[in-house]
Structures are given as C-alpha cells and as structure tokens.
Amino acid sequence: MSTFSNTNTAGKTADPTTAANIDRNVPLKQKIEDLSEFITSRKFGMMTTRDVKTGKLVSRAMALAGKEAGDIDLVFTTNTESHKTDELAADPHVNISFIDSSGQWASIAGDAHVETDRETVKKYYSSSLKAWLGDLGDGKHDGSKNDPRLGVIRVRTSTATYLLTNKTAVTRAAEVARGALTGSPPEIGKLREISELEVQQWRSIAT
C-alpha cells in the first residue's frame, strides 16, 4: 500500500491496473528463470547511477556480459576510466532496466562494485569490446583482454520487478480500448515481483 494518497476509494484499490496484472502464485524458481530468460534475450539494459557532482540520476546503455548466483546477479564489462566507476565508488546503489518493443520490461535494484582482477576480466571479455575501448597505439591500451582499462561491474540484486506478456500488440491495444470504454483495467501481462527475502532465499540455494 502506498503511503502517499490523495484519494479515498471506499475500500477499493486505487491502483487497479497493478491488481489486474499482478501474478503472485508463481514458484520462486519459475520467477527467477523467466526473469533470467527475458534479460538474456534483451542483452542490453539501462544502468542508472547517481552523478557524483550533481547528485542527479543518470543512465546509460550496458551490454550484459554474464549472470551469477543462479542468474540473479548481473555482470557487465566497463572501461574503468569512465564516469560510472566514480559514481559507483561514491554510491553503489544502481537500477538496471530492460524493455522490448512488445512492452515487456524488467527493473532490477541492487548494489554494484567494480573489479579489475585480470582473471575475472578475461572470463567476461569479448573481442567486441575493442571497438568501444579503441587502440591507443602504445602496445598496452589496445582493447585486448589485457588492457588495464578493462574492468567488471558486478551487480548484486536486492529486488526485481518485471512484466511479461504473450499477447500480441493488437490484443493489448484491444484491452486498453476496452478499459477506456468500461473503466476496467486492461490485463496486458504478468506482473511479477521478487522480494529481497526471495532473492536471499534463491542465492542461498544457488550458492
């Protein structure tokens, strides 16, 4: 229940869309596996951090490099000379979000830290990283797996929320149109939440 409210709904839910789409009766294993499959299929997510100088939230696209702890924790590669490493050092709280053209989405909250251990970097290295790092021509900063600029960002998940749907765009549009006419909230997909306790339970099983 929200602590902010500007309405009295006489016992009825003030957020009927969430109520119509929330999918609670799902085993934890299935919730984790479905979330993992969706994230993997999307590949690119938006990482939100807090700017050190202004305190404002900023986001940038990141390519998923891997998953850990039974696929609940996320791994990304990074140029350690970029601003985001300073931001994570100052405030490790992050949000990672994924979305596709069908309206499916996932939002993951957690803490992140940067690692520069060479074996870890090599484990998640991809040759495509050279295009982003470039070759500085000094025989050292060459975009290879040995480039000292390369690091890994590990995101330790705290909670996750996501929505999946098997409905077509036409069907979803019809649901929204019906809701506009009748006042009934559209059923557009399966909205699932993974609590901090559930994440801890899953991590204990996976590790």
Image (tube, rainbow, N blue to C red):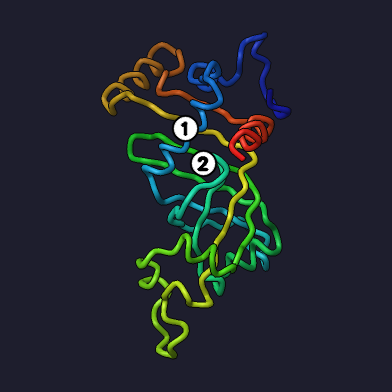
Say which amino acid is labelled 1. Glu
Real-space Cα distance between discs 2 and 1? 8 Å
Quadrant housing residue 199? top right
In the displayed structure image, the side of residue 123 where residue 201 appears, left or right: right
In the displayed structure image, the side of residue 1 where residue 27 appears, left or right: left
Badge 1: residue crowd in 10 Å (few <14, some 14–19, many ≥20): some
Residue at x 38%, y 34% (from the top left corner) = 103
Disc number for residue 121: none
Residue at x 34%, y 20% (from the top left corner) = 177
Pick whichever, 18 or 33, lies toward us.
Answer: 33
- In the rendered view, tell whether residue 20 sits above or below residue 117: above
Residue at x 63%, y 54% (from the top left corner) = 112
Q: Position of residue 76 (x, y in %)?
A: 50, 57
Say which amino acid is labelled 2. Asp
Number of numbered markers: 2
Q: Position of residue 37 (x, y in %)?
A: 41, 37
Q: Secondary structure at mark 1?
A: helix
Badge 2: residue crowd in 10 Å (few <14, some 14–19, many ≥20): many
Q: Position of residue 142 (x, y in %)?
A: 42, 81
Label 2–label 1 contact, CB within 8 A: yes
**Residue of label 1:** 33
- In the rendered view, tell whether residue 123 sits above or below residue 71: below
- In the rendered view, tell whether residue 37 sits above or below residue 181: below
In the displayed structure image, the side of residue 167 where residue 110 appears, left or right: right
Q: Position of residue 16 (x, y in %)?
A: 54, 18
Pick whichever, 185 or 204, lies toward us.
Answer: 204
Q: Secondary structure at mark 2?
A: loop
Disc number for residue 71: 2
